[in-house]
């Protein structure tokens, strides 16, 4: 029997046909790479932010359809949960005052969306995980009313064959189960896109993997889930567990999770797409009518729809992306590491830090990934998620002596990575005023050892000490966070939470 899905069933023949199409798409990608058909570099970057809807009481509001109707802008769209939205900013060239331009566009877009949402008591909150989310908020009935989300949920649930286990052991321990992928919707993120040439893809992807831990250390903003204080950045373990198609016996056998850091440095984008095909069964075996190899034989450029669809169901923290613009193919590195928020200026500072570091590290004569075992990069990522701004990371020693040393993340950033980021932004021809202002926000976080997660945790404990119960404290912290978020000053300058 086929599996029950929106719009019909997927049987064995559907999956076999889809598998053949995936293999054709991969061959088509290989030909495009060999024939050097890709777009010339245009230094283009893109930005997407996932958002939460919360009322004046700090609690989530399941009203994204109504809010989107009021916003009436194609820049905003649904996300997985009914309390989620996503805003997409048009691509920009990495040059000049690009970061100030981004900040201005985001302030305008989010301010307008917040005013419209507030008419329904469902204001916009940029945060990694809304602290007031409860288990009964994250159920299949609260998935957005969009066929693809229902279909994805049905397919992941069918592939797993049993309830999802959420087990995160942090400052406190969370252990519970879910019958759907709805807990994934608690994770709201920022995606940073960078268009690259095929020849530069591997260097940029490897650099992005190497610094993922640093991004989390300075940008962590998700310390709470279901009333528990967990990791400083709890999105990665939650996302992995909420989308895990592997029953326990396959986990024990070492089968890879669909949400993963990876397992090696790469030499081409093709390797990542090939890994996706080799390691991960299809979830949505929907075939396009296009014959990619025939399109290439006829001198055209294929859409590779099956490859793109399959790639979208493998949740790498740095994901390869194939796309077409005006009929010309291009490759992007999609950086999915960062949580949303706390403020527009914090988001833009995180972006400036990332783009600057990637540019410098990708062009080093002795790249960091040649001096750091991949397993260390993965361990660093886990450490940063657990400890945030207080993390200590393994990093190659400076000079030619080689070897690794453990260093506080804030010291690594201030002494080594901020100068590299500044040089990278200069290489992008970003103006000094933009470079200095936004990298100054990163430096300020490191100097004061404050980011979104540390502010939330400190505010929560102060609220509890003032006499509030746990639920009331989390709601109060969420309301105060939202107020300061909309005021817009970077999080490291926020005052400590206090009663009244």
Image: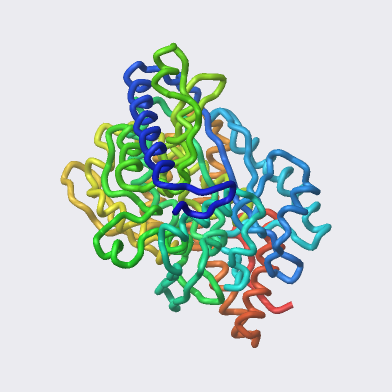
Taking the image as drawn, is residue 83 in sight?
yes
In this rendering, position of residue 260 left or right of residue 309: left
In this rendering, position of residue 53 left or right of residue 270: right
Residue at 71% in and 64% down: 61
The quarter of the picture where residue 24 lies is top left
Q: Which residue lies furthest to the top in this view?
A: 299
Residue at 35% in and 51% down: 261
Taking the image as drawn, is residue 496 in sight?
no
Residue 445 in the image, given as x and y percentages of width and height: 51, 57
- Which is nearer the eye, 364 or 165? 165
Residue at 74% in and 71% down: 57
Q: Quadrant of the C terminus?
A: bottom right
The quarter of the picture where residue 118 lies is bottom right
Residue 232 in the image, given as x and y percentages of width and height: 47, 66
Q: Quadrant of the N terminus?
A: bottom left
> Is 479 placed above or below 257 here?
below
């Amino acid at each position: 029997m086929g599996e029950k899905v929106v719009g019909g069933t997927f049987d064995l023949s559907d999956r076999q046909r889809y598998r053949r199409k995936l293999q054709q798409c991969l061959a088509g990608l290989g030909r495009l790479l060999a024939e050097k058909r890709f777009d010339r570099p245009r230094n283009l970057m893109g930005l997407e932010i996932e958002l939460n809807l919360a009322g004046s009481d700090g609690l989530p509001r399941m009203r994204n359809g109504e809010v989107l109707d009021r916003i009436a802008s194609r820049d905003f769209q649904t996300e997985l949960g009914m309390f989620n939205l996503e805003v997409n900013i048009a691509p920009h060239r990495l040059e000049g005052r690009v970061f100030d331009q981004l900040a201005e566009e985001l302030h305008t877009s989010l301010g307008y969306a917040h005013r419209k949402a507030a008419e329904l008591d469902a204001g916009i909150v940029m945060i990694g995980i809304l602290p007031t989310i409860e288990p009964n908020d994250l159920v299949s009935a609260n998935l957005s009313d969009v066929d693809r989300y229902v279909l994805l949920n049905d397919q992941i649930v069918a592939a797993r064959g049993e309830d999802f286990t959420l087990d995160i052991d942090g400052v406190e321990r969370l252990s519970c189960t879910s019958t759907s992928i709805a807990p994934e919707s608690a994770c709201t993120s920022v995606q940073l896109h960078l268009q690259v040439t095929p020849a530069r893809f591997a260097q940029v992807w490897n650099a992005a993997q190497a610094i993922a831990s640093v991004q989390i250390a300075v940008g962590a903003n998700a310390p709470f889930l279901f009333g528990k204080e967990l990791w400083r950045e709890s999105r990665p373990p939650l996302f992995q567990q909420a989308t895990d198609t592997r029953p326990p016996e396959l986990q024990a056998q070492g089968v890879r999770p669909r949400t993963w850091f990876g397992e090696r440095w790469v030499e081409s984008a093709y390797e990542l797409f090939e890994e996706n095909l080799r390691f991960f069964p299809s979830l949505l075996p929907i075939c396009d009518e296009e014959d990619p190899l025939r399109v290439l034989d006829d001198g055209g450029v294929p859409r590779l729809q099956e490859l793109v669809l399959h790639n979208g169901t493998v949740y790498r923290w740095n994901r390869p992306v194939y796309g077409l613009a005006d009929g010309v193919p291009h490759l992007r590195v999609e950086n999915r590491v960062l949580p949303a928020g706390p403020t527009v200026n914090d988001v833009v500072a995180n972006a400036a830090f990332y783009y600057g570091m990637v540019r410098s590290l990708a062009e080093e004569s002795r790249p960091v990934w040649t001096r750091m075992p991949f397993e260390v990069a993965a361990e660093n990522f886990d450490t940063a998620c657990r400890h945030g701004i207080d993390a200590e990371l393994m990093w190659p020693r400076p000079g030619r002596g080689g070897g690794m040393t453990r260093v506080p993340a804030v010291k690594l950033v201030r002494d080594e990575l901020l100068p590299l980021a500044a040089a990278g932004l200069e290489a992008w021809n970003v103006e000094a005023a933009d470079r200095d202002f936004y990298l100054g926000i990163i430096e300020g976080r490191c100097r004061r050892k404050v980011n979104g997660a540390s502010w939330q945790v400190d505010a929560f404990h102060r609220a509890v000490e003032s006499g509030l119960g746990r639920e009331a404290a989390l709601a109060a912290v969420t309301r105060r966070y939202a107020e300061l978020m909309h005021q817009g000053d970077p999080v490291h300058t926020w005052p400590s939470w206090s009663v009244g």
